[in-house]
Image (tube, rainbow, N blue to C red):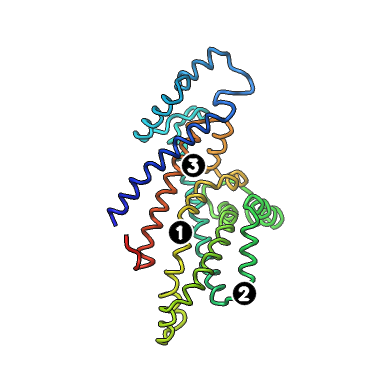
Amino acid sequence: MLRYTLSRLLGAIPTLLILIALAFFMIRVAPGGPFDTERALPPEIEANLRAAYHLDEPLYQQFARYLGGLLRGDFGPSFQYKDFTVTELIGTGFPVSLRLGGSAILLALLIGVTVGTIAALRQNTRTDYTVMAVSMTGISIPNFVMAPLLILLFAVTLGWLPAGGWGGGAWNHMLLPVIALALPQVAYISRLTRGSMIEVLRSNFVRTARAQGLPERTVILRYALKPALLPVMSYLGPATAAVITGSVVIEQIFGVPGLGRYFVQGALNRDYTLVMGVVVFYGVLIILFNLVVDLFYAWLDPKVKY
């Protein structure tokens, strides 16, 4: 297992290099620059700023300098947030996004697996059709539509919950953004669980367990659930990273000071180092989450050998 883990980590290095190179050169192709403002700067001041941030160097030198900083764990200074480095901004925004996205994934996993299992056990019944219809609705309606609807219903009309803000991470401030983030994931997870559970329930080892007279609850929880969760685990790797670091719209709508808001502001302001830092951080998270998912396979399915 250790050898497999090390080989996966080493194999991720070329992927990260390609990701860094693509993001580095693509953001510089975009129109505008970090010092373009509504009021044009005098040429000499702009030249001094570009020299201070090494933007006057050729692109290959800038890329080599950036890679050298990454090897030292330095994402560089932010062009727009003058008093902060990119590392400090990520350290400030990521715990908020982690708490928000982690709560959404846990909620989606709990509800999705439960509902999908119930639908599989009652295949082709009214319950099954209802679950699949609700799931398709959850997939079809994007969260930037669902979030304002939740605010309109629970904050404006009923007045039960605040319409926005973080409130230091209080549960009443977290509830609406967590639900808005979790609903699409609930739909995907429930559909994956249902399809996988139906296939597993038709397997020979499940028939054997039932023939031995075991209670249906024991058959489901002890024998069928683990192999049925394999497709869900495959989905959870990139989905978790995407929800944690990619909840850009939800953070904007609810005014949550997470990593997504920094990414949006960095892209709008052409803050090269901030955008690059978030992209690299996001890429590392995806690789690590996928690795964790692969390692969980050995626990879920004893037949898996690395």
Q: Residue at x 50, y 57 (%)?
A: 105
Tag 1 secondary structure: helix
- Amino acid at dot 3: Gly
Residue 181 vs residue 157, the one in the foreground: 181
Tag 2 secondary structure: helix
Pinpoint residue 130: horizontal percent, then vertical percent.
64, 70
- Pointer 1 local density, CA inside 10 Å: few below 14, some 14–19, many at least 20: some
Q: Are marks 2 and 1 in contact (CB under 8 Å)?
A: no
Residue 262 vs residue 184, the one in the foreground: 184
Q: Residue at x 44, y 74 (%)?
A: 224
Q: Is residue 221 above or below residue 61?
A: below
Q: CA distance from mark 2 to mark 1?
A: 26 Å
- Amino acid at dot 2: Thr
* Residue ID for mark 2: 127
* Residue ID for mark 3: 93
Q: Quadrant of residue 251?
A: top right
Q: CA distance from mark 3 to mark 1?
A: 27 Å
**In this view, the mark in front (3 or 1):** 1
Residue 82 vs residue 24, the one in the foreground: 24
Mark 2 vs 3, N-terminal side: 3
Q: CA distance from mark 2 to mark 3?
A: 41 Å
Mark 3 vs 1, N-terminal side: 3
Residue 285 vs residue 77, the one in the foreground: 285
Pinpoint residue 117: horizontal percent, then vertical percent.
52, 71
* Residue ID for mark 1: 234
Residue reaching furthest top?
44
- Amino acid at dot 1: Ser
Tag 3 secondary structure: helix
